[in-house]
Amino acid sequence: MIQVWGIDGDEMRMELEPVGYVEGIRKRPEDDYWGGEISCIKLIDEYGAEALQGIEDFSHVEVVFYFDRIDPESIVTGLRHPRNNPDWPAVGIFAQRGRNRPNRLGCTICRVLRREGNRLFVAELDALDGTPVIDIKPVMSEFLPREEVHQPPWSHELMLQYWKSKE
């Protein structure tokens, strides 16, 4: 069980149970070269193969996962330079996708490769081996932006190597 407590230890509490875990090659966090990575999301025993029935009819899924190896002391709640690069502007944690986030949640849209029972194989999931998966959602074009997406120039520079292959 993943427990997330309210900011000041108040009564608000949220408990999340992982639906599965990532089986992948990467054991340590890296900032770039996630292109071509193939991972498997193995559902916990509570969920049988029927939980994934029909998922292969979608080209992509959005995977919500928990950055379980982030030290709570390294959480950022305010401004920082993305990747600590002083050439990029200091922006708030919610204006970037860094892993040292307050609730330590990540999400990535991945290509569906295949399903085998209660295992879903995906391409380019930027999560480590053993990472708890909180949710899997099919990507539907109607939930994607309905207008042009824009972003600051530094973010394009930051992502330049992110989806390239390691080779």
Image (tube, rainbow, N blue to C red):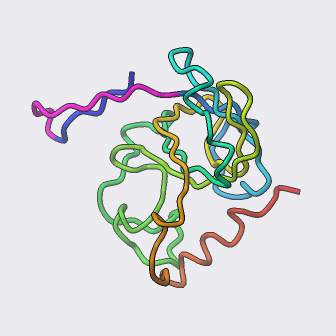
Screen quadrant of the C terminus: bottom right
Residue drawn at (63%, 54%) of the image? 60
Residue 27 image position (x, y, % from top left): 69, 34
Q: Looking at the image, which is closer to me, 14 or 109?
A: 109
Answer with left or right where residue 136 lies relative to residue 40: left
Residue drawn at (68%, 72%) of the image? 160
What segment is highlighted magenta in the picture? 8-19
Q: Quadrant of residue 12?
A: top left
Answer with left or right where residue 117 lies relative to residue 127: right
Q: Main secondary structure of the magenta part?
A: loop
Q: Looking at the image, which is closer to me, 30 or 36?
A: 36
Instruction: Please determine whether, in this image, residue 156 is positioned above or below residue 131.
Output: below
> Is residue 126 magenta-colored?
no
Q: Looking at the image, which is closer to me, 33 or 35?
A: 35
The residue sitting at the right extreme is: 167
Instruction: Please determine whether, in this image, residue 40 is positioned above or below residue 56.
Output: above
Residue drawn at (45%, 82%) of the image? 147
Residue 14 image position (x, y, % from top left): 25, 32
Answer with left or right where residue 98 lies relative to residue 57: left
